[in-house]
Amino acid sequence: MENSSKIRTFRDLKTWQSGHQLVLTIYKATKTFPKDEMFGLISQLRRAGVSFTSNLAEGFSRRSYKEKVQFYCTSLGSLTEIQNQLLIARDIGYLEAATADVMLEQTEELHKMTNGLIKSSKEFYK
């Protein structure tokens, strides 16, 4: 699991680190959204981003690998929500296409990284 000999806390997970950067990017990008989206896309995107990293952190702290996988899979669901919401924000003109594309690339990379966590965790509870 992500070079486990050096991983002591969830903050050591490369997946969490990259996810944290995405959350910061989401917060920065949504500052430019119209104020009437405060309880719409702004809130949804931010909550999904925080949920992604929070579920990684919670999964990391679980003792059983089956529970870890459950939380890592929940993280994937939040990541997919982010992808959907970024597409909506781009298509209605809240995000420039180039910005949305960079963020979508980040989510695709995070998807691969999270699947790696899931796969490696599953190997321990077969």
Image: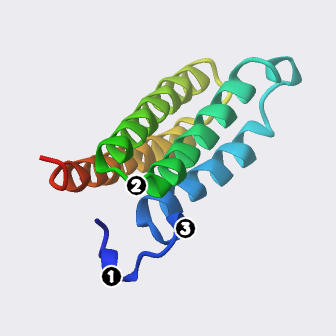
Reading the image, the residue beneath label 1 is 5
Q: Nearer the viewer, mark 2 or mark 1?
A: 2
Which numbered circle lies on residue 11?
A: 3
Residue shown at the point (54%, 30%) measured from the top left: 86
Mark toward the start of the polypeptide (3 vs 1):
1
Nearer-N-terminus badge (2/1): 1
Q: Amino acid at mark 2?
A: Arg
User: Left of 42 or right of it: where is 56?
Assistant: left
Q: Position of residue 62 (x, y in %)?
A: 44, 52
Locate residue 9, reporting x and y percent: 52, 70
How far is disc 2 from disc 3 in space, using C-alphas? Answer: 17 Å
| Nearer-the-camera pick, 81 or 96 | 81
Question: How far apart in space, not on screen, are marks 2 and 1 (Cα)?
Answer: 17 Å
Q: At 58% across and 46% down in the image, what residue appears?
A: 54
Between circles 2 and 3, the one closer to the viewer is 2
- Which of disc 3 and disc 2 is earlier in sequence? 3
Residue extending farthest to the right is 35
Quarter of the figure with residue 120: bottom left
Q: Secondary structure at mark 1?
A: helix
* Residue neighbourhood size for the residue with mark 2, other residues' Cα within 10 Å, grouped as few (<14), some (14–19), many (≥20): few
Other residues around mark 3 within 10 Å, as few (<14) / some (14–19) / many (≥20) = some
Q: Are marks 2 and 1 in contact (CB under 8 Å)?
A: no
- The alpha-carbon separation of the residues under discs 3 and 1 comes to 14 Å
Where does residue 123 sit, x and y in percent of width and height?
Answer: 15, 53
Amino acid on which disc 3 is placed: Arg
Name the residue type under label 1.
Ser
The picture places residue 30, in percent across and down from the top left corner, at 73, 37
- Locate residue 35: give its quadrant: top right
Q: Secondary structure at mark 2?
A: loop
Residue at the disc numbered 2: 63
Position of residue 116 relative to residue 111, above or below, is below
